[in-house]
C-alpha cells in the first residue's frame, strides 16, 4: 500500500514548481482526447501511481497519434498486444525521476540524468519561423513545452521515445563512417570487451534493501539500492575520413601506424604480432580509444565543473572559473590514462591530451552522443594515441 501524506508548503523550498492543481499523472488522466493511449500504458503497468505521488519528474508525453503510429511500427494494433514488461519499458523511456527540467535549461546532447529505463535522452535544438525547435532522440519533437505540474514538468511530444536496443558494438557496426575502426575492433577481439550489458551475478544487499523500503536516511539522504548492475562503455573514434587524412586507409596501414607509436613506448613488446594480444601495438591503439564507463559528452568533465549544487535549476554559480580543470580517465589499454580538461581562455570543455608546448589536442566533433544500450560513441577530430608526448604530459 502506498500512502501520500500532506506536507507543509514551507518544506518545499524553491526547487519545486508552484502548485498548479494537477500532478503529472492527473494532467494525463484529465486529457483523454489527447493522452488516453499513454494513460492506458501507465495504468496497466502501475506507473501512473508514481506520477501521482509527491516527487520531482520530467515526463516526455506522447500524444495518441504518436502512440498509434508506434503500435503499427511494431506490428501491433493496441497497447493490449504488448507484454506488461515491454509496456513498462515504454513508460520508463519517457520519465526521468528526481529531476525536472524546462527547455530553458536544455543544451544540445544528452541530459545528465537518465530515464527510468536507464537511458539518456538526446536533446536537439534548431530553429524555424516559429522560434526554437526542440527534438528528443532525433525523431521526436516537443510540440508543447514546459507544462508545469505539482510534481514536475511535462513536455508533449509527437513521436514515442524508443531508444535503440543495439549494443555499442552493434551500433558502431551499422555506422558506415567508422567501418575501418569497427574492422580493427573486431580483428583485435576488443569488441568482446565492450559487449557486456548486465551483471547477472549481482544480488542487492538484502539489509540495505530493507532499509530503503523503510525510508532509512543516511548522510541526510534517503537510502536507494540499485536492483541491478549494468555495464557501460565509451568509444572515442576517428572516422574513415580522418584516418585517410593521416595516411590510414586499411587495416594494414593502421597496424603500421600503431607499431610506429607503441613500439617506441613499449619496445619490449615490439615482437608481438598477434593482434589479439593485449600488448600488441594495434591492440593497444584500439584499446586506448575505449573506456569502461558510459560517458556522454557532458559527463567527461563539464557536469563536474564547480558550479554549485543549484546551478541546473537556478543558473546560480558560486565559483570563479579562472583555472583549467582536469580529469584523468583509465582506458582499456593497460596502464594508460587519458586527460580531459577545460580551457578557460577559450571556454572549452572536453579537450583531450593537450600537449602544453604545442597546444596540440584531440577534440570531439559535432558527431557526439551516439547512444547504445550499453554505451555511447563519439567522433574525434584527429588520431588518438598514447605516445611519448602524452606520457610526459600526464606524468608531469
Image: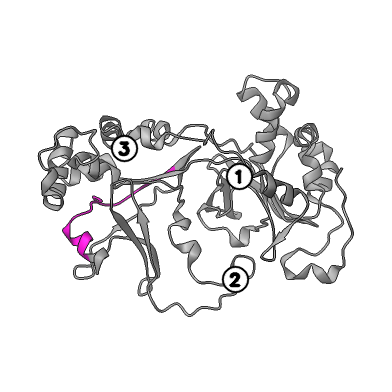
Residue 18 lies, in percent from the top left, at 80, 65
According to the picture, the residue beneath numbered tag 1 turns out to be 141
Residue 163 or residue 83, whichever sits in front: 83
Q: Magenta residues, as a range? A: 376-392
First of labels 1, 2 by sequence position: 1
Residue 348 lies, in percent from the top left, at 38, 66
Res. 109 in view: yes
SS at mark 3?
A: helix
**Residue shown at the point (83%, 62%) measured from the top left:** 19
**Residue shown at the point (46%, 47%) measured from the top left:** 294
Q: Quadrant of the N terminus?
A: top right
Is 2 located above or below residue 14 in the figure?
above
SS at mark 1?
A: strand
Q: Which residue is most to the right?
A: 6
Q: Nearer the viewer, mark 3 or mark 1?
A: 3
Label 2 environment density (alpha carbons within 10 Å; few <14, some 14–19, many ≥20): few
First of labels 2, 3 by sequence position: 3
Q: CA distance from mark 1 to mark 2?
A: 25 Å
The label number, if any, that marks residue 315 in the structure image: 2
According to the picture, the residue beneath numbered tag 3 turns out to be 178
Residue 6 or residue 226, whichever sits in front: 226
Is 162 located above or below residue 352 in the figure?
above
Dot 1 and dot 2 residues touching (CB under 8 Å): no
Q: Nearer the viewer, mark 1 or mark 2?
A: 2
Residue 154 lies, in percent from the top left, at 72, 51
Left-right relation of 354 to 304: left
Amino acid at each position: 500500500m502506498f500512502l501520500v501524506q500532506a506536507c507543509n508548503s514551507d518544506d518545499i523550498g524553491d526547487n519545486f514548481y508552484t502548485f498548479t492543481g494537477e500532478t503529472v499523472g492527473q494532467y494525463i488522466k484529465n486529457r483523454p482526447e489527447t493522452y488516453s493511449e499513454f494513460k492506458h500504458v501507465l495504468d496497466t503497468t502501475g506507473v501512473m501511481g508514481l506520477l501521482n505521488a509527491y516527487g520531482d519528474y520530467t515526463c516526455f508525453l506522447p500524444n495518441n497519434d504518436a502512440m498509434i503510429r508506434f503500435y503499427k511500427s511494431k506490428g501491433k494494433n493496441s497497447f493490449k498486444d504488448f507484454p506488461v514488461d515491454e509496456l513498462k519499458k515504454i513508460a520508463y523511456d519517457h520519465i526521468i525521476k528526481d529531476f525536472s527540467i524546462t527547455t530553458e535549461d536544455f543544451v544540445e546532447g544528452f541530459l545528465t540524468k537518465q530515464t527510468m529505463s536507464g537511458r539518456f535522452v538526446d536533446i536537439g535544438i534548431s530553429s524555424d519561423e516559429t522560434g526554437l525547435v526542440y527534438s528528443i532522440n532525433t525523431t521526436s519533437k516537443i510540440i508543447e513545452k514546459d507544462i508545469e505540474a505539482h510534481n514536475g514538468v511535462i513536455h508533449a511530444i509527437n513521436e514515442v521515445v524508443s531508444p535503440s536496443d543495439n549494443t555499442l558494438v552493434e551500433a558502431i557496426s551499422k555506422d558506415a563512417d567508422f567501418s575501418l575502426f569497427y574492422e580493427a575492433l573486431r580483428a583485435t577481439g576488443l569488441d568482446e570487451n565492450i559487449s557486456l550489458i548486465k551483471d547477472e551475478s549481482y544480488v542487492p544487499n538484502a539489509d540495505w534493501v530493507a532499509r530503503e523500503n523503510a525510508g532509512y536516511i543516511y548522510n541526510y539522504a534517503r537510502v536507494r539500492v540499485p536492483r541491478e548492475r549494468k555495464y557501460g562503455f565509451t568509444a572515442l573514434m576517428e572516422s574513415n575520413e580522418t584516418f585517410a587524412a593521416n595516411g590510414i586507409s586499411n587495416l594494414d596501414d593502421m597496424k603500421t601506424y600503431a607499431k610506429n607509436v607503441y613500439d617506441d613506448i613499449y619496445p619490449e613488446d615490439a615482437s608481438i604480432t598477434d593482434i589479439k594480444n593485449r600488448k600488441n601495438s594495434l591492440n593497444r591503439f584500439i584499446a586506448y580509444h575505449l573506456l569502461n564507463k558510459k560517458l556522454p559528452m557532458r559527463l567527461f568533465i563539464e557536469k563536474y565543473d564547480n558550479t554549485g549544487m543549484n546551478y541546473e535549476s537556478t543558473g546560480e554559480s558560486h565559483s570563479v572559473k579562472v583555472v583549467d580543470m582536469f580529469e584523468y580517465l583509465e582506458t582499456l589499454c593497460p596502464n594508460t590514462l587519458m586527460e580531459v580538461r577545460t580551457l578557460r581562455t577559450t571556454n572549452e570543455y572536453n579537450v583531450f591530451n593537450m600537449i602544453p608546448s604545442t597546444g596540440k589536442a584531440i577534440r570531439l566533433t559535432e558527431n557526439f552522443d551516439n547512444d547504445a544500450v550499453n554505451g555511447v560513441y563519439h567522433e574525434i577530430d584527429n588520431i588518438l594515441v598514447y605516445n611519448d608526448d602524452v606520457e610526459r604530459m600526464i606524468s608531469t
